[in-house]
Image (cartoon, helix red, strand yellow):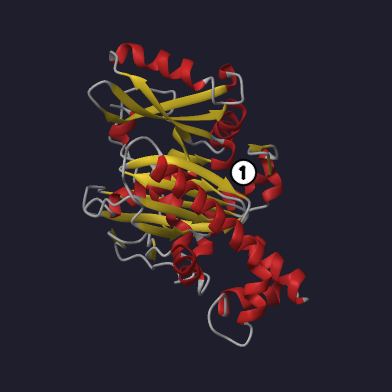
Amino acid sequence: MGGQNKTLIFKDKPIFGLDIGSSTIKVMQLDEVNRKSCKLQAYGVSKLDHNAIKDGVIEDFDTMAKSVVELFKNNIVGKITTTRVAMTVPSNHTFSKVLTLPKMKQSQLAEAVALESEQYIPMAFADLYFDYSIIETRKDDIEVLVVASPRKIVDSYMTLARMLGLEPIAFETNIGAVARLFEKQDQHNAVPSVLIDIGSYSSDITIHDKTMIVTNTIPTGGEMFTDSLVSSMGVTKEEAHIIKTKYGLGKSKKQKQVVEALKPELEQLIKEIKRMIRYYEDRGDKKSKIGQIVTMGGGANMLGLSEHIIDSLRLPVRTCNPWQNINLNKLQPPSQMERTMYVTVAGLALINSKEIFA
């Protein structure tokens, strides 16, 4: 969802990404972005009090603003050189739908998309910002991806940005940002894929075939893995975190206990992936098959998770490295454990200002 300001002044001025997650805030600025590579200008992460956000809406602006200021003061590697920002809005409060419409003139499309979308979105259209992109144009019809987000959510993020003296020029779902990163990295290996972004308290799952086809968010994430270990194994939260990061689902003396403790979350994850694959492979008259699973986000670091997904789905699994094709520009890289956390913000930082101000 692009910003409302369509001025063409400074259209080549840089942009940085600001990703406000469930438990952390991340920023990244990339320069000299092109099809093959880009140069790192700055990045950083800091913790966030998730109580500042309720149902996707920022409610405690002072706490949130202090967290962002703290990040900029103490946790930036490199230097952010612009006030223009692209921000994420939470996918679990966003609606997306692929529509098939009769072929029509471009001037008629926006109204047709709005009318058709109203049937599927359980909110008054006046209370939403919506955007759409054409997936495929065929002989008699077109496929369109529609994304809509409640105005009160987007407006709260816009208010925060302006409190901080930033110029918000784009808002995008976590899933949309992740898809951009995937498309840049996999432009020569475009097989239909399942993208799984495992956050702290939720996981975004996307079927991607040249573009996003279907998305969903489920309440399973890294912090919930930790909580399940606490309740099942009778350990402290700190001990559970160590068990999760050191042993995970991998072979160890604790493997049986860990697998049993995480069984409900893992079953929910696998069940939802299967449901979405079935939807994709059964839709229309297409005979496309999913070719790979791509895991990403902080929760994807858990040992043995990829092997568990492979055993459950009989599909190849790989973990997305957001730092692929990024020239570190002599900056210190993040730790191995932190690297996958930057998937969403890296996707935001890859936004080309010409996409928005064209």
Above or below: residue 111 compared with residue 228:
above
Give, as a three-letter code, the residue at label 1.
Ala
Q: Nearer the viewer, residue 49 or 257?
A: 257
Residue 242 in the figure: left or right of residue 280: right
The quarter of the picture where residue 47 lies is: bottom right
| Picture coordinates of residue 235, whole percent (x, y) | 75, 77
Above or below: residue 230 compared with residue 153:
below
| Picture coordinates of residue 50, whole percent (x, y) | 67, 50
Residue 341 in the figure: left or right of residue 245: left
Q: How many marks?
A: 1
The quarter of the picture where residue 264 lies is: bottom right
Name the residue rendered at 38%, 61% in the picture: 320
- Quadrant the C terminus occupies: top left
The quarter of the picture where residue 336 lies is: bottom left
Above or below: residue 17 compared with residue 293:
above
- Quadrant the N terminus occupies: top left
Residue 339 visible? The answer is: yes
Q: Residue furthest bottom?
A: 253
Q: Nearer the viewer, residue 110 or 64?
A: 110
| Picture coordinates of residue 113, whole percent (x, y) | 42, 19
Residue 199 visible? The answer is: no
Q: Nearer the viewer, residue 240 or 233?
A: 233
Name the residue rendered at 36%, 58% in the picture: 292
Tell me if mark 1 has few (under 14), some (14-19) or many (20+) residues whose alpha carbon lies within 10 angstroms of its own. Answer: some
| Element at label 1 | helix
Name the residue rendered at 43%, 26% in the picture: 131
Name the residue rendered at 65%, 38% in the picture: 58
Residue 341 in the figure: left or right of residue 23: left
Q: Give the residue pinned by disc 1.
A: 65
| Picture coordinates of residue 185, whole percent (x, y) | 29, 54
